[in-house]
Amino acid sequence: MKSSAIKKSTSQKLIFTLLCILLFYPPFFRGLFFQKELIPTHIIIAVVFITYYITNRKQGIDYKFSWIEIGLLSMTLLYTLSTFFAANIELSIQETLKYINYLLILILAKRLINDKQRLKIALTILVTAGVLVVFIGVGTALETFKYNGAFVGGMMNSTLQYHNTFGAYTLAILFLAYMLAGNFQSKEKYAISIATFVLFFGFIMSYSRGAWIILPLVGFVYYILVSVEYKISFIAHLLGNLVGLAVIIKKFNSILQTSGKASGWLWLLIGIVISVAVSTLLERFLKKLNLNKKVYNIIIPVATVLMPVIVLLFKNTILGFLPKDLAERLGSISLKAETVTERAVFYKDAFKIIKDNPIIGAGGGGWETLYKAYQTYAYWSNEAHNYFMQLWIEIGTLGIVIFGLILALYLYRVFIVHKNTDDLELKNTIVGILAAVATILIHSAIDFDLSLAAIAIVLWSLIGMTLGISRDMKELKISISSKINYVVIVLSVVLLAASSLNYFAANAASKGIQLVQSKQIQQGKEKFKLASTLNPFSPNYLADYANLSNALAREDKNAKGIKESIEIMDEAVKLGKYNFKLLSNAIKFYLKNGQIDRSIDIINSLEKYHPLNSATYENKSSLLMALADYRLKNGDIEEAIKHLEDIVKIENKIKSLNDNIKNNVEMNSMVRFVKITPKTQENINKAENRIWFMDYR
């Protein structure tokens, strides 16, 4: 019996350690936004969960499922279902795998982070990761080392590659650090005080206006909900951070403009020392002062509500104290800002997609695949810049309702714990986690933070931790939960298998590219054949395989091989019917192989799904010119003239599209029009000359 308990404890500790590693590293790999970094993480998480499941089965351990877990499982199954009707099967599968990942993270966090000690460890790991992410951004800004995309245009992106997401991430982790600062004692206290300043500095250097606005809003709610001791700690650390920042910010920014930037580290250290000193002394002073609780619970909140009035009155003085670029960024916060109006256009277009896919959505990647067919003007954005809208597009009204219920259940759980527990540390910890979760969700309403799997892992792990330390939570019966366990383990096996196949397919394609570049076409073709076999839903692998097969077949004058390559391209076009680059290349492929009707069908698809892309009309004019030449060569002058006249009509078509944009959009510098490219103009001129010559003759 004792041996069994030791084995159980050892295995639990091992899985917990692996979970902590999974919580730590994701932000460092471009936020796991790209498949190259995400797929290995899928594999690792699947292996960890399957190991966890098998270990528990051997030990006869059964767990119950909460309704939040059931909600996320339902969302995952909806993504699976929507794949069968998806606009882009490949992207839909990728998104489904991400949600299986999040489900497993939620379950592991709930089951393994179920006491205060483990919770403190997990939260400290998240804060440590956040601090290191900021240091990477600072090091890149100061040219101490290189990390591509970590500091661009004076804005800190760090490993997340996007300044707005970096701002939201650092703020979310900052709230965890503020909470831990109220929790920790002695040496730990100094370490977490350092962390708060580093995170605050990174948050400011992100230049994310959306995140800046969220700090006072969520910070106010956090302050209201925590106990007086944590209120004192929060005031002390926030003021300490502000003082430290005020001392160094102008000097640090000026150093960024010089060639020798190493001294920036010294100024960051000075900011840390000042911040920690002010925070420590102020917290001790306030505790010693022992003010009436009403000061913290009533007077300070009321004064905080009035703070915006003071800020507005002294706005110019405050902005004058800041570096010019920071002041300009703060001063530009407005609902009339061009980025705000542009996102309003995104949301308007998103509703058009939702209207056409109302119940279960257009599948994962729905916005990226479809938005160019619905866009109001010719913008480029593969993200809807609103997680809730993107979710609605992908899994429909049913999916967004389920997600809404998950959030409602989470808030209810926080409310119950906060109301019923007598453990102040636990109560304040729950509020700190709530602040981090709220930061991510609120900012995701105006940006695409949750498209980065690293941010989503933070979100779902925090929700899982909340469930793990909750007591007296209503859960499903063991008999029902055991059946759900089978569904979850099947999904984890699917995650492992599909991700492994995608990994090997990507490797095969990469080797295929290298072989083609070294003129080993036959071997390259075989690699792309393998890639398209391992991942049969990738239109790009199929298109590359078709092109290489066709090139070899044409060289050998192999009619059967040519026919087979055309059939492969047909499948690629079917899978990637919205893929502009693939379709553009397919036009040339079919034309080269005498498939005129197929070429015309594809140009019609381009015009239908990419009506505001200037290259659509360049492709169309070039195809029609090639067809006109072909008709003329074969003596079919009447058909040739029709093609030439269609080329000439392109100019009026583009004018009509641009007039429509002008009539439906509030004009600003963000608005993009359809252009007549030099090649399109050349084809129009050539067509007009030929028509004139034929008429004259």
Image (tube, rainbow, N blue to C red):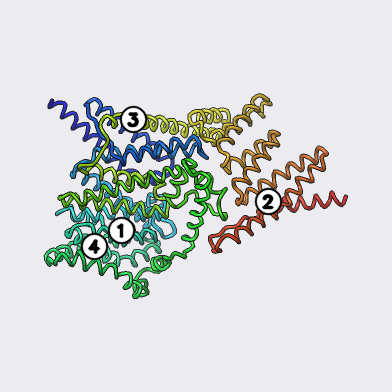
Q: Which of marks 4 and 1 is nearer the N terminus?
A: 1
What is the CA distance from the residue labelled 1 to the residue labelled 3? 37 Å
**Which residue is located at x 29 percent, y 29 percent?**
482
- Image quarter hosting the N terminus: top left
What is the CA distance from the residue labelled 4 to the residue labelled 1? 22 Å
Please provide percent x and percent y for residue 316: 37, 74
Please provide percent x and percent y for residue 602: 64, 40
Q: Which of marks 2 and 3 is nearer the N terminus?
A: 3
* SS for callout 2: helix
At label 4, the amino acid type is Ser
Q: Which of marks 4 and 1 is in front?
A: 1
* SS for callout 4: helix
At label 2, the amino acid type is Lys
Q: Label 2 belongs to which residue?
A: 679
What is the CA distance from the residue labelled 2 to the residue labelled 4? 60 Å
Say the numbered circle drawn on residue 218.
1
* SS for callout 3: helix
Q: Compared to 571, does 191 lie above or below?
A: below
At label 3, the amino acid type is Ile
**Residue 144 visible at all:** no
